[in-house]
Amino acid sequence: MSKIYSKLEKCLKYIRKKTDFVPEIAIVLGSGLGDYAESAKLKTHLTIPYSEISGFPVSTAPGHKGQFVFATVNGVKIVIMQGRVHLYEGYDISDVVMPVRLMGMMGAKALFLTNAAGGINESFHSGELMLITDQISAFVKSPLIGENVDELGVRFPDMSEIYDRDLRNIIKKSAEELGIKLQEGVYIQVTGPQFESPAEIIAFKSMGADAVGMSTACEAIAANHMGMKICGITCIANMAAGISKNPLTSSEVNETADRVAPDFERLLTESIENISDYLNNN
Ligand code: HPA
């Protein structure tokens, strides 16, 4: 058995000692968006801090709590990562994607990724939401490097449709029904923790990126490798370096995420319900 898989099994065993909850949908809450886990819409069953799980990476990023929240929303069973682990915190890439893999092993069929990012596409505005259509992860080490975890997936997994078309359509429809404007675009992951230079943003734009952030793409690769259905929403927290007139700060990111929280919460709740209907009928 691969080392990574046996570590995951140990973590799962710990979770299973505490709860037999089998989530349908796994959700990762990005910078400043963690309050969703405390939304009145949720009935919380149990929370497990990452620090309780032996060998588990613990998030140190500001604006990120580090715990799994097991809950139901309108009757749909979900597990939330309230706070993710980032590469810039110094963890190995295989540890960064461990929580997402674990949520898949808990039984989640779909993964809903969220994040805050800088807008590269100049038709975007800070405070808008963007549906992720595809991603560029070529600047970040692949989470699949090393011995393949055969128990999870194949050595050379296909990545032609990382963000599931059906789930994307469901989220678009949910946004339309709620009257929430939803941009669409390609997310590029960088390591951070420094924000980008204007020259980097020009380069990323020419590559086809619409938004830049420090997470998500590696998680989507690991989840796709193990066959989860993936979707993602980005909160455009600021316009990227060189497009924005101001120096970038993490407080701007968190302020914008706070401002967007009510729409984000409505869209997430509606999409979860619609995705669950879809999963149960297909
Ligand atoms: N760049 C990278 N990551 C980010 C940004 C950004 O401009 N905004 C929020 N996360």
Image (cartoon, rainbow, N blue to C red):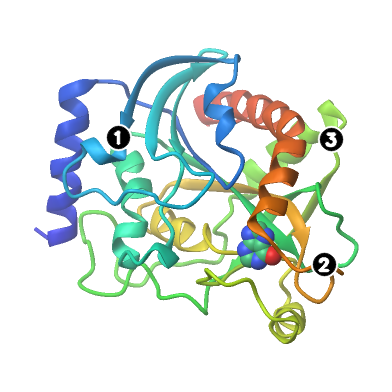
Name the residue type under label 3.
Ile
- Mark 1 or mark 2: name the one nearer the start of the chain: 1
- Going 90% across and 62% down the picture, which residue do you hit? 123
Q: Which mark is residue 246?
A: 2
Label 3 to label 1: alpha-carbon separation: 32 Å
Residue at the spot of label 3? 180
Residue 52: image x %, image y %?
Answer: 22, 36
Is 167 positioned to the left or the right of 255 in the image? left
Above or below, comparing residue 58 to residue 258 in the picture: below
- Mark 3 or mark 2: name the one nearer the start of the chain: 3
- Mark 3 or mark 1: name the one nearer the start of the chain: 1
Would you identify the image quadrant in which residue 262 lies?
A: top right
Q: How many marks?
A: 3
Label 3 to label 2: alpha-carbon separation: 27 Å
Q: Secondary structure at mark 2?
A: loop
Residue 27: image x %, image y %?
Answer: 50, 37
Using the rendered image of the protein, determine whether residue 209 is visible from the camera's viewpoint.
yes
Residue at the spot of label 1? 106
Residue 50: image x %, image y %?
Answer: 30, 40
Name the residue type under label 1.
Met
If the picture is divided into quarters, which one holds ligand 1? bottom right
